[in-house]
Amino acid sequence: MSVRGVAVAATLVLSACAPDSLDNYKATGFNAYLNTVQNQCQPLWIGGQPLQQLNMQYAGAWQSGFDSFLDMTSRLYYNRMSTADYRVAVQSLALTTTDTRTNNSIDCIIAKLPANR
């Protein structure tokens, strides 16, 4: 297959994906919440991983953990997970229930939940 053929095939595959699978630009409320958490909950830590920016390009080697963290935080935001279950889930990513930095981060993430979500 030519380079042009590969490019066309890649374009067709990507265009078949839902827009939210590549960039969740439609989730303006959730994105605003993540911005609030990012700006007001620093230092934000999950275990030994500092999260200075809630952006996949900054996840680095912790990509799978970061993906899980965003999924859990989305579930929390959209009322599909209780705050107690969220705490346990995030602590499982940190591999500890006693890490002060992680628990402080979880406390702040929960405290910043908007009432009208």
Image: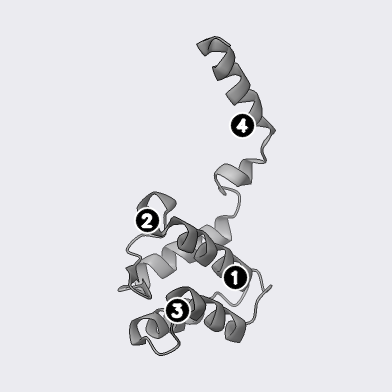
For marks 2 and 1 on the same chain, the one whose residue lies earlier in the sequence = 2
Earlier along the polypeptide chain: callout 4 or callout 3?
4
The part of the image, by quadrant, that contains residue 13 is top right
* Number of other residues with Cα within 10 Å of mark 2, as a class: few under 14, some 14 to 19, many 20 or more: few
Q: Which of marks 3 and 2 is nearer the N terminus?
A: 2
Above or below residue 64? Residue 11 is: above
Q: Do the residues labelled 4 and 3 touch (CB within 8 Å)?
A: no
Q: How crowded is mark 3: few (under 14 residues within 10 Å), some or many (20 or more)?
A: few
Q: Residue 95 carries which label?
A: 3
Residue, disc 4:
14
Give the color scheme: rainbow, by chain, secondary structure or one colour. Answer: one colour
- Residue 104 figure quarter: bottom left
Give the spatial CA distance, label 4 vs label 1: 28 Å
**Spot occupied by residue 70 in the image (x, y as percentages of width and height):** 52, 63
Query: Image height check: is 99 above or below 11?
Result: below
Q: Tag 2, which secondary structure?
A: helix
- The amino acid marked with disc number 2 is Ala
Q: Give the amino acid type for the residue marked by disc 1 in the picture.
A: Tyr
* Disc 1 residue crowd, few under 14, some 14–19, many 20+, Cα 10 Å: many
User: Which callout, 4 or 3, points to the residue nearer the camera?
Assistant: 3
Task: Identify the mark at residue 61; answer none if there is no mark.
Answer: 2
Report the mark closest to the observer, 2 or 1.
2
For marks 4 and 1, the one nearer the N-term is 4
For label 3, the SS is loop
Q: Can residue 117 be seen in this view?
A: no
Determine crowd level at label 4: few under 14, some 14-19, many 20+ residues with C-alpha closer than 10 A.
few
Picture disc at residue 77? 1
Sequence-earlier tag: 3 or 1? 1
Residue at (40% x, 90% y) in the render: 98
Q: Disc 4 on helix, strand or loop?
A: helix
Nearer the observer: mark 3 or 1; the answer is 3
Q: Which secondary structure lies at badge 1?
A: helix
